[in-house]
Image: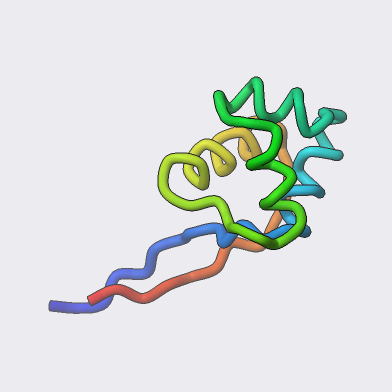
């Protein structure tokens, strides 16, 4: 089979903080909107952890709806 290119945003500490600031949200507000702890947002922004799974998907949706532009990384899958 051929390779399929899939867009996937890799969220890092800079992009999470930039999205939050673009929205005008505090860490607490972002946490409430996403249904997570404020400490989790803080840990993402410090680079301790990276969003993954459902959290990353939700960040993608929030970013798209807020018209937050970022570069999507292309990954090749077999």
Q: Which corner quadrant holds the C terminus?
A: bottom left
- Residue 38 point in image, percent of width and height: 70, 33
The relative height of residue 34 versus residue 17 in the rendered view (above or below) is above
**Where's residue 63, x and y in %?**
65, 40
Residue most toward the front? 39
Residue 71: quarter of image: bottom right
Q: How is colour applied across the structure in the image? A: rainbow
Choose top left, top right, bottom left or bottom right for residue 41: top right
Q: Residue 4 placed where, x, y %?
A: 29, 70
Tell whether 68 sits left or right of 51.
right
Q: How many marks?
A: 0
Which residue is found at the position 78% from the left and 59% from the top? 14
Image quarter of the N terminus: bottom left
Q: Which residue is at a point 75% across and 23% down the rendered structure image?
A: 29
* Residue 7 picture location, percent across and down: 46, 60
Q: Residue at x 74, y 45 (%)?
A: 42
Give the residue drawn at x 48%, y 70%: 74
Image quarter for residue 21?
Answer: top right
């Amino acid at each position: 089979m051929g390779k399929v290119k899939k867009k996937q945003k890799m969220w890092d500490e800079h992009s999470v903080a930039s999205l939050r600031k673009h929205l005008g949200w505090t860490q607490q507000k972002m946490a409430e909107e996403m249904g997570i702890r404020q400490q989790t947002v803080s840990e993402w922004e410090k680079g301790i952890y990276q969003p993954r799974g459902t959290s990353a998907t939700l960040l993608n949706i929030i970013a798209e709806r807020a018209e937050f532009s970022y570069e999507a990384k292309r990954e090749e899958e077999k």
